[in-house]
Image (cartoon, grey):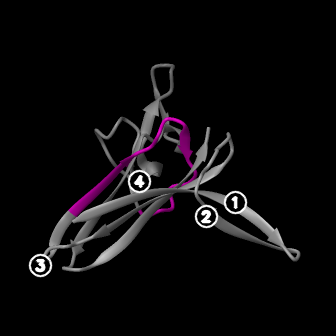
């Protein structure tokens, strides 16, 4: 399986009174900019690949925008995984609190089967801190 990763900056373009979202190469990013991280995969082999895992660490300069990408999250550097709503982190007072998007350190997808020649794209959205 081959993987190719890209990062795009989401810009709002207004032309003729209409606003649209456009993804562009990030030349310069500032806090609050929205980024889209994409990983494209392709099975270049002759056999199906089962239970293929794609893991992406979040750069420390960004926070996960949402957890609606069909992926699992980790809040402990990739040691444990789950849906964000089910994860807990230390609250700094000896207890635990519900994990939030800014606690996420990694995201991952588990692809049950990738057929020979099949391709696809996985993505998550983040905001520059």
User: How far apart are the two marked residues, 3 and 4, measured between alpha carbons?
Assistant: 33 Å
The one of 103 and 7 positioned closer to us in this rendering: 7
User: How far apart are the two marked residues, 1 and 4, measured between alpha carbons?
Assistant: 28 Å
Mark 1 packing: few (<14 Cα in 10 Å), some, or many (20+)?
some
> Contact (CB < 8 A) between labels 2 and 1?
yes
Q: Quadrant of the N terminus?
A: bottom left
Residue 62: percent from left, percent from top: 55, 41
What residue is shown with label 2?
23
Which numbered dot is residue 46?
A: 3
Mark 4: secondary structure: loop
At x 82%, y 68%, the residue is 14
What residue is shown with label 1?
11
Magenta segment boundaries in residue numbering: 52-70
Mark 3: secondary structure: loop
Residue 43 is left or right of residue 66, and the answer is: left
The one of 89 and 50 positioned closer to us in this rendering: 50
At x 27%, y 79%, the residue is 118
């Amino acid at each position: 399986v081959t993987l190719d990763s890209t990062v795009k900056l989401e810009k709002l373009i207004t032309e003729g009174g209409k606003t649209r979202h456009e993804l562009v190469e990030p030349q310069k990013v500032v806090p609050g900019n929205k980024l889209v991280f994409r990983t494209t995969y392709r099975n270049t082999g002759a056999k199906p690949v089962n239970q293929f895992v794609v893991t992406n660490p979040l750069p420390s300069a960004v926070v996960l925008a949402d957890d609606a990408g069909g992926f699992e999250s980790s809040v402990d550097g990739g040691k444990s995984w789950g849906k964000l709503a089910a994860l807990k982190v230390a609250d700094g007072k000896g207890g635990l609190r519900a994990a939030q998007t800014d606690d996420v350190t990694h995201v991952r997808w588990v692809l049950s089967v990738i057929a020979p020649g099949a391709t696809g794209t996985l993505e998550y959205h983040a905001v520059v801190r």
